Image (cartoon, rainbow, N blue to C red):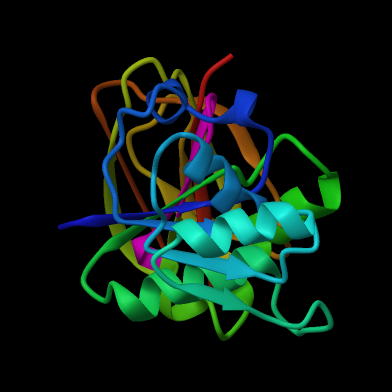
Amino acid sequence: MNTVKVVVGGPVQFWPSNLQDNQISGPFVGVDRGSLRLIKMGIRPDYAVGDFDSVSDEEFKLISQNAKKVIRVDPVKDETDTELGVMTAGEHFASSEIDVYGFSGGRLDHLLTNLLMVLKPNIKPYLERLKLIDSQNQVRYFLPGSHQIEKINEMKYLDFCPLTAMHLTLNDERYQLNHKWVSQPTSYSSNEFIGDKASFSFDDGVLMVIQSRD
């Protein structure tokens, strides 16, 4: 499956090294200042999306001249810029996975909004295609059922974070659960793979799974 990259405006030092080194191919959706950062790397975003309140008039002119298509919205809106970027990627690249970069490293309220946006009706249709990636973490989301994930090289830790109430089973991780009732959002952090894969299942809601490293 192809992958569209959504680049948000978070600090560059929190990007994974392959993006910092311009070793990732498109298509790209730039979000607000993320569009400008792509252009300064010599990358023409397929879409530049947002209210662009974080760039100057001159910077927006540069974005307009270089992005293949610009979607500018009113700053007073129901969706965040990141959500608009995900929706643009999901709608215009219908068969692609969606990798989001630049979602972390800045304001804590922005980080929380980005992590929890999958609970919104306008983002939930793209939930299982979505990954949030930075230099130390990869975040994925799952709907009810049985799942298996593969260990990412250099990622030591595994976090299972129910975002809603559910019964959660962790079959073959270092710390296991058997049909554990979780009544509210919580984080089962610092778990680990035993082998190269990890299996889990749950019966309701949305589960966030994070692979991370120090």
Above or below, 187 relative to 194: below
Was residue 106 drawn as part of the magenta stretch in this picture?
Answer: no
Can the viewer see residue 206 in this picture?
no
Q: Quadrant of the C terminus?
A: top right
Observer able to see residue 185: yes
* Region rendered in magenta: 128-140
Query: Which residue in the rendered view is the most extreme toward the left?
Result: 1
Q: Residue at x 59, y 48 (%)?
A: 36
Quadrant (top left/top right/bottom left/bottom right) for the N terminus: bottom left
Q: Position of residue 141 (x, y in %)?
A: 46, 58
Residue in the foreground of this view, choosing between 72 and 10: 72
From the top left corner, tell me how far across and down residue 60 is, in percent: 67, 60
- Above or below residue 57? Residue 189 is above
Image position, residue 43 (x, y; %) = 39, 44
Instruction: Based on the picture, tell me whether residue 129 belongs to the magenta stretch.
Output: yes
Quadrant of the rendered structure where residue 62 is?
bottom right
Give the residue drawn at x 30%, y 28%: 23
Left or right for 58, reference 101: right
Task: Give the camera-side residue of 83 and 148.
Answer: 83
The part of the image, by quadrant, that contains residue 193 is top left
Question: Residue 126's x, y, as percent?
Answer: 41, 73
**Residue 161 appears left or right of 144:** right
Q: How many marks?
A: 0
Residue lying at 42% horizontally and 80% vertically, measured from the top left? 125
**Prevailing SS of the magenta stretch:** strand
Instruction: Give the residue displayed 49% in from the left and 43% down from the top.
Output: 38
